[in-house]
Structure formats: C-alpha cells, structure tokens
Image: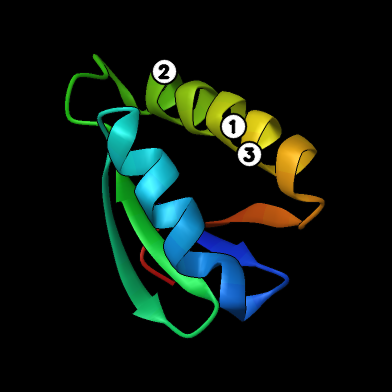
Amino acid sequence: MRIRVSDAESVLDLRDHLRRAGCIAVQVAPDALQVEVPDAPNAGQETREVRAYLVAWTARRGVEAEIAGDDE
C-alpha cells in the first residue's frame, strides 16, 4: 500500500519507524512510501497494522500521513 506524508522531509523518519515495526517500507516519491507487512495474514490485517503504526507516528511528529491506496 502507498502512504503519503504531508511533510516530505519526514518521509525517511516514517520509513525508519515502519521498518522498526517489521514492515517493508520503500520511498517511491518525495512524499510517499510503498509499505508491506510481511507477517500479515491478509490485506485487512495489513491495513489495520499500518494504520496503528501511522496513528502512533503522526501523534508524536505532528505530521499528517494517510494510506493512499495500493500501487497508485
């Protein structure tokens, strides 16, 4: 899934946060990451996990991030 970040300068910080949580996160644009959760049993669980990671990260950083969809 693709995640867009409101502050492009924070993309690498989010990438590192997601990687520490066990995700595969790759920067695909100045303001976007492509993210996978390898251990998620299905797409629904993957989305729930990534949303939880985003809530924690955005609360600490004051930066907005949203799931933009798959392979946009």
Residue identified by numbered label 1? 51
Q: Nearer the viewer, mark 2 or mark 3?
A: 3
Residue identified by numbered label 2? 45
Quadrant position of residue 44: top left
Q: Where is residue 6 in the image (x, y as percent from the top left)?
A: 73, 70
Res 51 seen here: yes
Q: What numbered label is drawn on residue 57?
A: 3
Task: Work out whether residue 60 or residue 33 is closer to the camera in this orientation and state it.
Answer: 60
Q: Distance between the Cα atoms at labels 2 and 1?
A: 10 Å
Q: Do the residues labelled 3 and 1 touch (CB within 8 Å)?
A: no
Please state if 48 lies on the left or on the right of 22 as rendered.
right
Q: Is mark 2 on a helix, strand or loop?
A: helix
Q: Which of marks 3 and 1 is in front?
A: 3
Question: Relative to 44, is 17 above or below?
Answer: below
Q: What numbered label is drawn on residue 24?
A: none
Residue located at (43% from left, 65% from top): 12
Q: Which of marks 2 and 1 is in front?
A: 1
Residue located at (31% from left, 34% from top): 20
Q: Are marks 2 and 3 in contact (CB under 8 Å)?
A: no
Q: Position of residue 51 (x, y in %)?
A: 59, 32
Quadrant position of residue 54: top right
Q: Is mark 3 on a helix, strand or loop?
A: helix
Q: Distance between the Cα atoms at labels 2 and 3?
A: 18 Å
* Image quadrant occupied by the C terminus: bottom left
Quadrant position of residue 70: bottom left
Going by the numbered disc 1, the residue's amino acid type is Arg
Residue located at (36% from left, 28% from top): 43
Q: How is the image coloured?
A: rainbow
